[in-house]
């Protein structure tokens, strides 16, 4: 209020430092569950991939995507989600802490609020929390490499976890024995192990597990059409993203996803 603004205490505001994100850079907020190794055990997650847990993560992420209309894409796996804000976004004047804390707290509260929808009678035993960070990427290539890095991580972890839990659940190994059995193995060894000992072709496992989850904002066809007519000197206002989203479990490392959805990076 005006009265407060004039108080003699007002000077302490100068101690608050701004932390603006550089202009013209892709802005990524990644959130990650705190101690979800333990959280997933305590809440009886089915190992290695609990679909309720993955579904709830995506539900909370969609809530975030719908709230911030400058998010163009989100990618999630395990207990993490990355939110990509358009490189020209102006949300909160690109103040890093303001953006990051709002994303992570909305994600956390959504995860908690929608818990019963996914876990039914499994009680939420304590309030889950997530960390958050902001990373800026100056080029499209950097951004795509970032997303490729997360998807490669999803694949590497999932291959390992699939082997680990098969050895425990189907061969009766202890976690320590299972870990020992997998020590030093290459991807090809793990694929072979799954095939020869468990008659499992890794590539036939659900893409949800192997590829993670991509959320993109849908553009309505009218805006898209108008967008296509625009030329460089056009005075038409910038594209407004429509607040409905679409979920994929697909490869984003190769170029075909990006060709099919070229507008993600182009506008
Ligand atoms: P911003 O997102 O910028 O913080 P805001 O609407 O939260 O916007 P604040 O300056 O933080 O704005 O003010 C919080 C407002 O929330 C108060 O002005 C008041 O209207 C309301 N509010 C918060 N706590 C209470 C409360 N316990 N009882 C009644 N009103 C409250
Ligand atoms: P930190 O606080 O450092 O992030 P963490 O225990 O959360 O510690 P992560 O590397 O983030 O460690 O790993 C998350 C862990 O959560 C996974 O290793 C896995 O055990 C568990 N987890 C997350 N989601 C699921 C799921 N849908 N199904 C089964 N397990 C899951
Ligand atoms: Mg971690
Ligand atoms: Mg974690
Ligand atoms: Mg994690
Ligand atoms: Mg407030």
Image: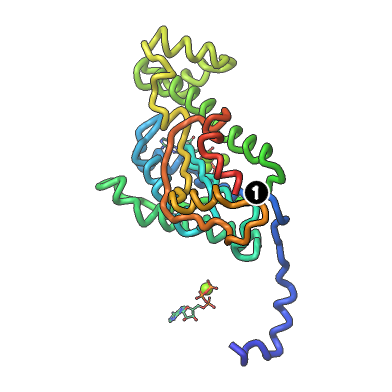
Image quarter for residue 262?
top right
- Depth check: 128 or 174 in front? 128
- Depth check: 231 or 134 in front? 231
Image coordinates for residue 187, horizontal then vertical, percent: 55, 16
Which residue corresponds to the image point at 36% horizontal and 43% vertical from the top-left?
43
Q: In this view, does 11 lie to the left or right of 29?
A: right
In the rendered picture of this protein, how many numbered marks are placed on residues?
A: 1
Image quarter for residue 263?
top right
Can residue 149 be spotted in the picture?
Answer: yes
Image coordinates for residue 151, horizontal then vertical, percent: 54, 32
- Depth check: 29 or 232 in front? 232
Image coordinates for residue 103, horizontal then vertical, percent: 53, 57
- Is ligand 5 closer than 8 angstroms to the Cβ of mark 1? no
Image coordinates for residue 71, horizontal then vertical, percent: 54, 52
Coloration of the structure image: rainbow
Which residue corresponds to the image point at 41% horizontal and 7% vertical from the top-left?
196
Residue neighbourhood size for the residue with mark 1, other residues' Cα within 10 Å, grouped as few (<14), some (14–19), many (≥20): many
Question: Is 72 situated above or below 198?
Answer: below
Element class at badge 1: strand
Classify the position of the N terminus by image quarter: bottom right
Can residue 132 be spotted in the picture?
Answer: no
Q: In this view, does 175 lie to the left or right of 146?
A: left
- Depth check: 146 or 254 in front? 254
**Residue sitting at the far left:** 121
Residue that carries the numbered disc 1 in the rendered image: 26
Question: Is 34 situated above or below 51?
Answer: below
Which residue corresponds to the image point at 45% horizontal and 38% vertical from the top-left?
213
Which residue corresponds to the image point at 26% horizontal and 47% vertical from the top-left?
120
């Amino acid at each position: 209020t005006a009265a407060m603004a004039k108080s003699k205490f007002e000077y302490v505001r100068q101690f608050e430092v701004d932390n603006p994100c550089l202009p013209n850079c892709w802005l990524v907020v990644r959130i990650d569950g705190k101690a979800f190794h333990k959280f997933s055990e305590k809440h009886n997650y089915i190992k290695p991939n609990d679909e309720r847990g993955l579904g709830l993560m995506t539900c909370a992420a969609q809530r975030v995507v719908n709230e911030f209309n400058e998010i163009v894409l989100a990618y999630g796996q395990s207990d993490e989600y990355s939110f990509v804000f358009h490189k020209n976004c102006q949300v909160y004047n690109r103040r890093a802490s303001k953006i990051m804390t709002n994303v992570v707290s909305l994600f956390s509260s959504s995860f908690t609020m929608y818990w019963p929808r996914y876990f039914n009678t499994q009680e939420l035993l304590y309030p889950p929390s997530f960390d958050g960070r902001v990373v800026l990427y100056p080029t499209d290539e950097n951004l795509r490499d970032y997303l490729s890095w997360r998807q490669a991580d999803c694949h590497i972890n999932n291959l390992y976890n699939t082997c680990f839990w098969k050895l425990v659940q189907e061969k009766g190994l202890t976690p320590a024995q299972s870990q020992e059995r997998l020590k030093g193995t290459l991807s090809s060894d793990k694929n072979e192990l799954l095939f020869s000992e468990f008659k499992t072709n890794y590539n036939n496992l659900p893409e949800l597990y192997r590829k993670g989850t991509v959320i993109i904002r849908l553009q309505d066809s009218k805006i898209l059409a108008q967008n296509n007519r625009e030329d460089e000197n056009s005075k038409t206002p910038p594209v407004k993203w429509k607040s409905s989203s679409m979920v994929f479990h697909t490869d984003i490392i190769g170029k075909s996803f990006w060709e099919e959805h070229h507008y993600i990076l182009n506008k």
